[in-house]
Image (spheres, grey):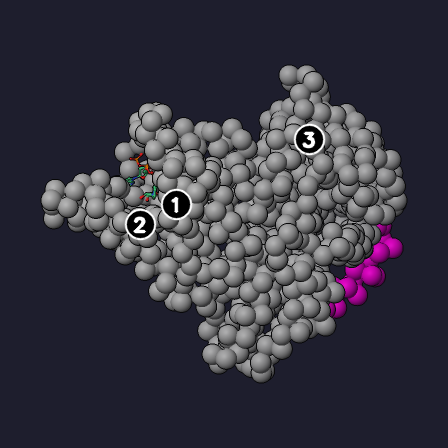
Amino acid sequence: MDVLDSDVVIVGAGPVGLMLAGELRLGGADVVVVERRTEPTTESRASTLHARTMEILAARGLLDRFGSLPHHTMGHFGGIPLDLTLPGPYPGQWKAPQVRTEAILQDWALSLGARLRRGHELTALTLHPDAVEAQVSGPAGPLRISARYVVGCDGEHSTVRRLLGAQFPGQDAGRELIRADIDGIDIPARHFQRLERGLAIAARNPQGVTRVMVHEFDGPAGHRTGDPEFADIRDAWRRVTGEDISHGTPIWVNAFGDASRRLAAYRHGRVLFAGDAAHQQMPIGGQALNLGLQDAVNLGWKLALHLTGRAPDNLLDTYHAERHAVGRRVLGNINAQAALLLGGPEVNPLRAVLAELITHEPARRHLAGMISGLDIRYDVDASGHPLLGARLAHDHPMRSGRGLLIDAYGDPEHHALLRATAAPWADRVDTVAAEPDSLGPLPGPDAVLVRPDGHVAWIASAGPPGPQPLVAALHTWCGGPAHPGHTRTTTGHHTPVERRHDMSRLNGKTALVTGSSRGIGRGIATRLAREGALVAVHCSTGVPTAEEVVASIEKEGGRAFVVQAELGVPGDVHELFLALEQGLKERTGSADLDIVVNNAGVMGGVSVEDTTPEKFDRLFAVNARAPFFVIQRALTNLTEGGRIINISSGLTRVANPDEIAYAMSKGALEQIALHFARFLAPRGITVNSVAPGITRNGSPVFDIPEAVEQMAQLSAFGRVGEPQDVADVVAFLASDDARWVTGAFIDASGGTLLG
Ligand code: NAP
């Protein structure tokens, strides 16, 4: 039997499962999604995206992928027209076929590294104290997936729920709506038309197909086992409207009832639920899909932080606390709408009163807030204001799925205090600057902390940031400040995956390693990828070897891509960044860069007499000029708390007449650490130099035992260095553990400089 390890198994590759997969990947968790269907669905059941979901998709940079979407400001509440307009960038409701939404979310999740297994059906779940085992049957036979958490995103008839025996309390369907797409009929359009015997809806699409929906006030209870026949809708339509549609050709017919159920707990230890697996409701007003997507976005970052060992103890439990309450409210409004829509003549007076109330602005806004999801308030903080958070997230995209501290202080002292307070959380929270008074109506907040799901967790208004409330909010939502040892917990799996769990300090980070097609650079790229970073493997002419490096990283479960550009020639850095930014955007949705390792270099190996001006210039162009301009160009990409590491050489400390120009170029390179460290400290970026001694780089000289013997004597340890010896030092400097080291020269020469 095949065996797979992962942090999380998601059951169900519908929109909710795929959204969750992407969110978990952004947070650095391993994800496998298993899906019973071999192909994505072709039925577009849910097509409405409400304002809050639109804001989330925009914040993750996903909205562009949809192109322009049809949009209406008018919706309805139980069939009573309701203007959904509220302040915000996406007022009203937007239409995207579910197949399109699913395809976009699938591409996104896969590009972030989620693994999707279609044609795989969950058959059993075994819960252990520290793991969950999912038995899955797939096209190639049974598969066992060992994970730390399972999330059921497998819809109304959830297998995960059934296998767990989880309670799904609520009410059975008492009424049903039958619907069909019918070709070849020409009947009048009806918009939520209540007639004497029932409700009728008919709308013809531009292709001439008519969507017909009918409910009979004294019709059947609505708990069918299979889909209805065309005869059922034909007869019901005739009874309600008097019209004959029997000559039409049905494309499909189905029915849904007004059952309303919600799990008592969205979390059962290591098993969680999101979307329709957690709550069943009538699909009125397109709220079900939106509710599910928002469940996923609430859960993803919390579960990822929990898995990486950085979450406060109760963070994962806030998923149930927050979303169960939202589910109750949404199911409540859906039940109210079902009563208004499907009730008989006895609900007419109620409808009349409500229609009157909706003409009053506060009542309209109240209902619009409920339907659009813009009224969701979590108990994050006394001053928490999610609507504000949603808008801020729109102005400051949160593609990385990390928290966001938006700093609009005009006063430099307040500005510095805020940043210093948040610096220990730089691995989880990005700090961005905003114009003073740009965060809201005057007098606006001076700074806000936004959770990864766009909800505001802390607001500073008028005066200094007040470090204590900010620190408290950071502790509540992000966990303790980063410190050595406070890294990801292990799974206890005795597999190669376990090794990755132990070394995951760079999960969610992106890195450029110049000259990593071979030698020390290859060692560094491999090590950073093992730590979880997405690595750009750069080379000049060695594309095939760079591709080999990427393949070997991917084989180990890491993520990398090749960028090619010759350094030391005009336009070098521009070309490098064109390829780099494209590669990053394709995989992460942004060009953010966390780590730059300037490793590419050329040796001299020529005597003083043979050093021509051309050779001298070439050494400086590749070893000193290129790194300077790489850093200059990366300034806009580098994230708060970023890392710059320049690979120098022990030859800046040991005399060698054949390497004077080379040593001079490395001496110039070392100046970068000193001066850039000061320049970039306000952004929490560290800049350091690492100086290897003689290191085995694949050059033929290392195949000559006598030569190796001689070189080994230079090190205090009596051996030559391995790329791994240097890569380990670079990985440390790249990690949060080295946040207090900047402007330093690190001797990584195995004691060669001791003399
Ligand atoms: P290496 O094996 O010679 O590999 C050099 C790497 O840099 C290759 O990936 C190469 O790409 C790339 N590169 C070279 N020139 C380039 C250019 N003009 N433009 C773009 N890429 C270029 O190097 P290494 O020995 O591992 O050394 C790595 C770094 O450590 C260098 O900065 C070196 O000075 C320093 N260092 C090495 C030692 C040592 O003993 N190995 C000791 C001290 C310091 P292609 O494959 O495309 O050519």
Q: Which residue is mark 1?
A: 752
Of labels 3 and 1, earlier in sequence is 3
Q: In the visual, does 47 lie left or right of 567?
A: right
The numbered mark, 2 or 3, whose residue comes first in the sequence reads 3
Disc 3 marks which amino acid?
His
Q: Of label 2 and label 1, which has the lower sequence position?
A: 2
Q: Answer yes or no: is residue 500 visible.
A: yes
Q: Crowdedness of circle 1 by 10 Å Cα count: few (<14), some, many (20+)?
A: many
- The numbered disc on residue 654 is 2
Front in this rendered view, residue 85 or 448: 448
Distance in Å between CA atoms under marks 2 and 1: 9 Å
Q: Which residue is mark 3?
A: 494
Q: Residues within 10 Å of mark 2 (few under 14, many from 20)?
A: some
Q: Quadrant of the N terminus?
A: top right
Which three-letter amino acid code belongs to the residue tagged 2? Val
- Please give the range of residues in magenta: 343-363
The residue lying at 75 percent from left, 55 percent from top is: 313
* The stretch drawn in magenta includes residue 358: yes
Q: Which mark is residue 13?
A: none
User: Which SS type dominates the magenta stretch?
Assistant: helix
Q: Nearer the viewer, residue 511 or 408?
A: 511
